[in-house]
Amino acid sequence: MLSAFRFLFLYVNMAKLLFIFLSGFLYFSVVSQVQAKNKLPADSAHKIFSVNQKKGLKDDKGRILLPAIYDELGWSDKKSRDGINYLGYKKDNLWGLFDADFNQVVPAKYADLYPINDELFIAGIKGKYSGTNFYGVIDKEGKVELDFTYRNLLPAGEFIIGASKISNKIYFGMLNLSGKEILPFQYFQLRHLGSNKFELIEESGMKSLIFIDKNPVVIYDDLDSISDFKDGVAVLFKNGKQGLIGENGKMLLPINYKNIEWNGGKKILVTTLNKWQILNDQAKVKGKHLADSIYFLNDSLLIKNTSGFSEIYHTEKNEILSSLKGEFAGVFGDYFLLKKNNIVKLISSDTARAD
């Protein structure tokens, strides 16, 4: 440890804010499928009214289109959607479907019901003995297109995210709208980010950004998290640092920033990390690093703290030996002290790094 004092730290540049003006590469449209305002079939002026806690429907002139005899009008997942010319209804605690003219096309017999598009609908039925809901897909006339064998189904653009119970565990996979398996049911979680982009989470916790056209393509792996795509871009998070990626999979900013924000896809506000140089005893630069703070464990092992994460970096091998979730706070015997959310934990140095 004492020999580490042979090295001098030269603090080169404080973290600062800078503006990056985009000049043409952020031109993508906003994805807003799940945030769209509700439009009832055929006429956005239709209004739901209530009588004795039952729901009905009136037109813009106050004429009753559906009497107030329904438990709910809409969808069982409580989400509103544009462009769907059908209307779900709940009666006697079960869901059915009206067409755009408010004709009943599917009787009320499902525990859950919500649309994928104007042709296909996810439906759930309650298991006879287990009481668990099982999910499948029906068409607009009630014909079963995908059997009720899944523990959950979620619409995801041109695809369906599904969950199945395998060996007493729930695993996620992906299907196309024809029911063909696109991703095997072996993942801890899948999240739709928009524009056929998905966050894939392994059981180990590793996260990847994938794009699905005809086949899945991994754009970036080994991430901590990914934001939804907005204005054609998404923020990638890894080891306390952030980067920016476009819908086409091109990295617009490397994962080297403390914080990234943007405004309408025209201006990006970036907070840079502190820049450090390591000098030897002859004042020659031996290394450059980006981090909130750095210090040596010994002659070759360097600690880099960034936004609640820390890295153990080998200066001779020029590689990261280990990434830790928590701010490195010191050494206690054979243990490292990690601080996260104001809680300090001990972890074995043997499990945190490889010499």
Image: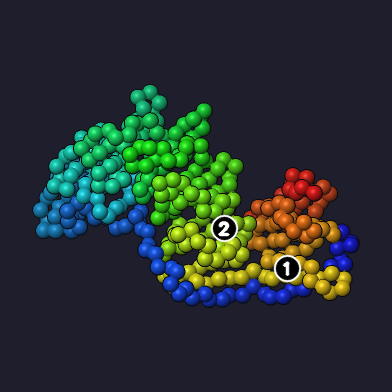
From the viewer's perspective, is 295 left or right of 257?
A: right
Closest to the camera, between mark 2 and mark 1, is: 1
Give amino acid for label 1. Answer: Lys
Q: Identify residue type, mark 2.
A: Phe
231 or 285: nearer the viewer: 285
Could you tell whether 231 is left or right of 226 in the image? left
Q: Which of the 4 quarters of the picture holds residue 257?
A: bottom right
Q: Position of residue 282 (x, y in %)?
A: 87, 73
- Spatial CA distance of label 2 from label 1 is 21 Å
Is residue 229 at all visible to an observer of this figure?
Answer: yes
Q: Residue at x 43, y 72 (%)?
A: 24
Q: Is residue 168 left or right of residue 71?
A: right
Q: Residue at x 58, y 47 (%)?
A: 206
Task: Give the residue displayed 40% in from the left and 26% down from the top.
Answer: 130
Relative vertical location of residue 245 with respect to residue 164 in this rendering, above or below:
below
Q: Secondary structure at mark 2?
A: strand
Give the percent coordinates (x, y) of residue 133. 37, 33
- Which residue is at 35% across, 53% downward? 34
Q: Residue furthest right?
A: 2
Q: Residue furthest top?
A: 129
In depth, the one of 302 and 111 nearer the eye is 302
For the residue carrying disc 2, how many other residues have a C-alpha within 10 Å: few (<14), some (14-19), or many (20+)? many
Point out residue 182 in the picture as x, y percentages from the top left corner: 42, 41
Residue 288's disc number: 1
